[in-house]
Amino acid sequence: MREKDKMKNIGLIVSLIIILFLSTYIFMLKISKKIDSDYKKIGIRVKDYDIEYYTVYNQDILSEYKVYKINNSSIKDIKSQLESSKLWSRDKYYEYIMAEFFEIKDSEKIPIDREDVYYYENGYAIFDVKNAKLYYFSNRPFNHYKDYLESLGLDTRQYDGREIYSVRGGPQGDGTDYYVYSFNKEKGKEISATLDKRQNWSKEKLEIDILDCFEHNSEIFNIQNGYYHYEKVCRTSDAYKKEHFTDEEATGYEVGVYDVDNNILYYYWTSY
């Protein structure tokens, strides 16, 4: 009788181990499937068998940085998707952001090939058509860029090109936005005419210590025909105080420079 109880207990333990193993295996399969499908979140229809492999370079509790190698036979279809998508475009990220995309070979960081790439508008993802690779930060909070239509008094949405450097953080969104827009001649003339009527813009060049904020666009110092804007800002939820504050209450400033001859708008906003 005692021997039967012993065998019964052993059988129960073995059953529990098998159940635990199967549960763990099924859970890992689901996690693996979720990871393999991450790229689908950014609007690219790719079959799992089109992924040759992927490499995880950076990983923490909140996000992962991955590089997917896509089967070359799928590139034609994917490029067609990218061209017709409203989420992907040729509008490149600013250089600070571009530095975050890389691969590692023999312990050396290799920057991505920029010859034929598309950029995901609302997040950190780049598709390299030439080399059939997707660079992707999964689960990273998407950065919904604003275009400062109210503060600039301009409609900047009809641009030919746009470079962005945006670093924000904290509950109040402190940080810096640094935009460079390029426009065609027709839109450029429209912007010039608009700025000529704006009281907060002037043809008088700003002081060098203010223009130094455009550290990556030294060409602004050589602008011969331009409009300039400088204003201190106050980050607050109080609508009245946002428009009526002292210099001591200011939390940052914004600088705008428009190059009339080249139809380029430079904009810098910072709050600390």
Image: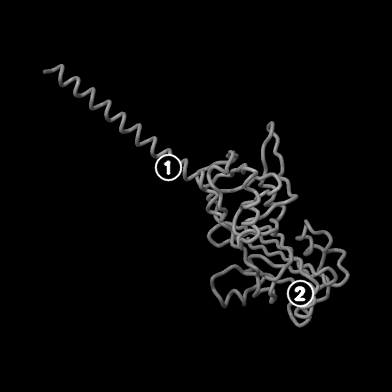
Name the secondary structure under disc 2.
helix
Task: Kindly identify which numbered label has been placed on residue 187.
Answer: 2
Please, which residue is most extreme toward the top here? 3
Residue 12 appears at what percent x and percent y?
23, 27
Residue 102 x, y percent position in the rendering: 67, 43
Coloration mode: one colour
Task: Give the x, y percent position of residue 70.
Answer: 62, 44
- Is 114 or 146 nearer to us in this picture? 114
Tell me the element at label 1. helix
Q: In this view, does 139 lie to the left or right of 180?
A: left
Tell me which corner region of the image, top left, top right, bottom left or bottom right, holds residue 144. bottom right
Q: Residue 201 in the image: state x and y as whole percent.
A: 76, 76
* Front tag of 1 and 2: 1
Question: 138 above or below 157?
Answer: above
Q: Is residue 66 visible?
A: yes
Task: Name the amino acid, label 1.
Answer: Lys
228 and 209: which one is in front?
Answer: 228
What residue is at 54 percent from the left and 73 percent from the top? 238
| Side of 253 relative to 141 (left or right) | right
Which residue corresponds to mark 1?
A: 30
Q: Is 184 drawn above or below residue 93 in the view shown?
A: below
Q: What residue type is labelled 2?
A: Lys
Q: In the image, 265: left or right of 272?
A: right
> Which quadrant of the view contains residue 255?
bottom right
At 53% from the left edge and 51% from the top edge, which residue is drawn? 40
Q: Mark 1: few, some, or many residues within 10 Å (few <14, many ≥20)?
A: few
Quadrant in the picture for the C terminus? bottom right
Q: In which quarter of the image is residue 10?
A: top left
